[in-house]
Image (tube, rainbow, N blue to C red):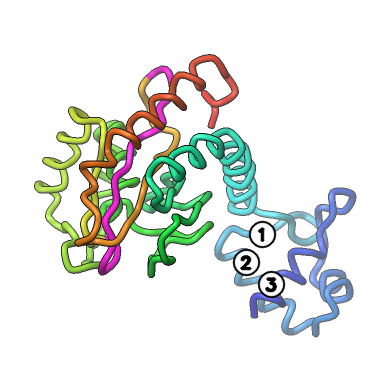
Amino acid sequence: MIARVADVLGAFTAEEPVLGVSEIARRSGLAKSVTSRIVADLVDEDFLERADQGVRVGIRLFELGELAQRSKELRRFALGAMADLRQATGLTVQLSVLKATDQVYVEILQGRSAQLDMRSRVGGRVPAYATAGGKAVLAHLPEEAVEQALAIDMTRLGPRTITEPALLRWHLARVRVEGVAYEDEESNVGITCAASAILRPDGSPIAAISVTGPAGQVDMSQFAPAVKTAALGLNRRIRSNSVFNNL
């Protein structure tokens, strides 16, 4: 099914941004009835939108394209600091951004130890409330954004997932004071993590940088200063690079 959707979306070009179902079917090699169903579903989800002579790319694809460009620039900007952090700690280093109520991973550098069994992968999403990176970002957001992130149906992803909004708010208050967020088997069994937010000059968050290791074998408080230092270094670079104010 994904391949068919890709064929439909691949029919559009910059020169011909509006196409009818018959032309999409011809270009994609799919039956017209199949194409019509896929187009209708994509319109319902705002990946395509109706136009006078057919359909065109919808707002959700523009949003995904914007996120992809932001992720590319952010990875390039943070990769050196991530590599240094991995060298200093030996742990897996992750770079993630908040998208709606999820933390989306845009880069992961595997640590020197055996690969961990984690939910996170590049492009993958984990609810922000269950991750150190998510909590690091939420701690620096306005109250209405925090309300949105905590208003969802919070379920347990790991044995210690915090699902009580009041307790999560207490943790966010600690993050604002200490500059580091922690996760202990909240998004995954056997995973512990520490994260700090990467901030614009006005204090609003761009992303989070984090280190991850095996729970019960790693004391994250020992690595928190290194994570915080990496984030502070990136924050200093951001102050001299205005392009990141729009990320």
- Pick whichever, 107 or 216, lies toward us: 216
Tell me: 104 left or right of 23.
Answer: left
| Percent position of residue 35, x then y | 74, 77
| Residue 190 is inside the magenta segment | yes
Q: Secondary structure at mark 1?
A: strand
Cα gap from disc 1 to disc 2, whole angstroms: 5 Å
The part of the image, by quadrant, that contains residue 227 is: top left
Mark nearer the N terminus (1 vs 2): 2
Category of crowding for the residue at label 2, using alpha-carbon neighbours closer than 10 angstroms: few (below 14), some (14–19), many (at least 20): some
> Which element is circle 2 on?
helix
Question: What x and y, as percent, mark residue 162?
Answer: 16, 57
- Whether the residues at callouts 1 and 2 have beta carbons within 8 Å, the answer is yes
User: Quarter-wise, where is residue 240 in the image?
Assistant: top right
At label 3, the amino acid type is Val
Residue behind mark 2: 42
Q: Residue at x 26, y 67 (%)?
A: 190
The reply to whether callout 3 and callout 2 are in contact (CB within 8 Å) is yes
Q: Label 2 sits on what residue type?
A: Leu
Left or right placement of residue 117 versus residue 47 in this view: left
Name the residue that disc number 1 marks. Answer: 48
Whether residue 157 is visible: no
Per the rendered image, the range of residues in magenta is 187-202
3D distance between C-alphas at marks 3 and 2: 9 Å
Q: Is residue 147 left or right of residue 91?
A: left
**On the image, numbered disc 3 is attached to which residue?**
5
